[in-house]
Image: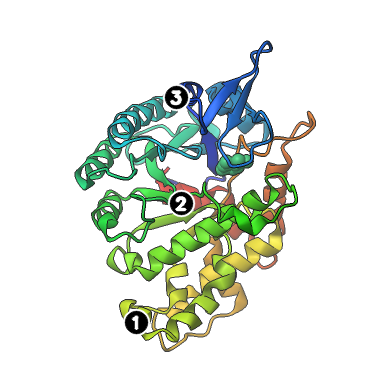
Amino acid sequence: ANVARKLLVDIHSHVYLPRYAALLRSRSTAPRIKTLAPSGEERLLILDNEPSGGRPVGPQYWDRDEKLKFMNQHGIDVTVVSTANPWLDFLGPSEAIELAEKLNEDLEEYCATSPVIPASKSTPDPSGDTLRRIYAFGLLPLVPGIPSDALIESISKIRTLPHVRGIILGTQGLGKGLDDPQLDSLWAAISDAGLVVFLHPHYGVDSNAWGEKDNGHVLPLALGFPFETTVATTRLILAGVLDRHPALKLLLAHSGGALPALSSRLSSCITHDPVVASRLKHDARHYLGKLYLDAVAYGPEELGFASDVIGRAGSYSASPEVLPMTLEEKRSKGAKQMLFGTDHPFFPPLSTQEKWQSVTENLKAINEVQGWSEQDRDGVRGGNAVRLFGL
Ligand code: 5CU
């Protein structure tokens, strides 16, 4: 693919495909979609403490024309869609296996029949394929009780779907999180398949931390979600997953949560804990350099800081000798691992304004990061996604 094409690529964009929405409608407990009488309006209940009656949900979640309309409205050329949380986490193994297979096929069809990118923005792919407007992360039936073979089989099937370029994963694993040694063969298979893992939260953290005041979903979404990702990724690093599977491509939602801000503290705590330290091949900060982050942080300072941390990781590869890097070098290097996203269709505008604030804010943030060159910004807007997903 020609990386010089200036495409705007959204890698954080969700769907509940019709088959999944039908499952949510069939349920009487969360996660569910409930229908209000007599209006017939539908409401989504997926998180704890949904406002009474749930949140409005509609075609933006399942209708591809709505996704394309949103893309056109915001100048988004290509979207890599993923099923929204809580994926298949609440199903038993046999149901999860069956649904994962069908939904992955649905996703392939959703992408393969999406419009092609206009010739003015596209160059022939080396494989002769035409670049389409939509690609996808598939789903794994990663639920407690699932045999490893079924997971590996699922990866093999996903590999055959040309427009499915990764998988979205929550943090529950087989019920024991992502540092579970039972997952090692799965990491090997994903890494071998070259699929990108999009690590996304759903559970947040212990809701006792939020106190008694009613703050709606602000604390679980602003803090709980990113902290869940922070903890899950840290556990994965501490379990040596990135030492055993150095080619694993991990893309973290919400710019990696608090991990960029805490990685030197993490490193220090490891240094003072010889048991953990002896398990790892590198300084903790080295592993940050292996991660990809979405650029869904809403502010230029946060994006700049995250890129510094990701970019400086190379300095820690030859631990204990730290190679000097200038701020510009770190920032520009880190920018190559950050990718634009919107979180559509979550966070819709409260009024019927033309553009979504959640999109314009993230684009403005990318434009305003100090020290990123125009080439860095083009990369974050789309060039990095072109490379990572082989578009
Ligand atoms: O607003 C929300 O509930 C969410 C959600 O559940 N998942 C997500 O990706 N973004 C927002």
Q: Would you call the spot at circle 3 few (<14 residues within 10 Å), some (14-19), or many (20 or more)?
A: some
SS of the residue at dot 3?
Answer: helix
Position of 364 with respect to 316 (left or right) is right
Q: What is the distance, in whole Å, between disc 2 and disc 3 at their CAs? A: 23 Å
> Which part of the image, by quadrant, shows the C terminus?
top left
Disc 2 vs disc 3: which is toward the camera?
3
* Mark found first going from the N terminus, 2 or 3: 3
Q: Residue at x 51, y 57 (%)?
A: 229
Q: CA distance from mark 3 to mark 1?
A: 45 Å
Query: What SS does tag 1 mark?
Result: helix
Residue that badge 1 annotates: 275
Question: Is 120 above or below relative to 293?
Answer: above
Of labels 1 and 2, earlier in sequence is 2
The residue at the far top in this view is 38
Corner quadrant of residue 149: top left
Q: At 28% across and 48% down in the image, what residue appears? A: 193
Q: Nearer the viewer, residue 59 or 311?
A: 59
Q: Which residue is mark 2?
A: 199
Q: In the image, is the residue at mark 2 within 8 Å of ligand 1 by its beta carbon? A: no
Q: Amino acid at mark 2?
A: Leu
* Percent position of residue 99, x then y: 34, 29
* Residue 187 in view here: yes
- Residue drawn at point x = 32 percent, y = 61 percent: 247
Quarter of the image containing the N terminus? top left
The residue that mark 3 highlights is 23
Could you say whether the residue bearing mark 2 is in a helix, strand or loop? strand
Amino acid type, label 1: Val
Q: Is mark 3 within 8 Å of ligand 1?
A: no
Residue 58 in which image quadrant: top right
The residue mark sitting in front, 1 or 2, is 1
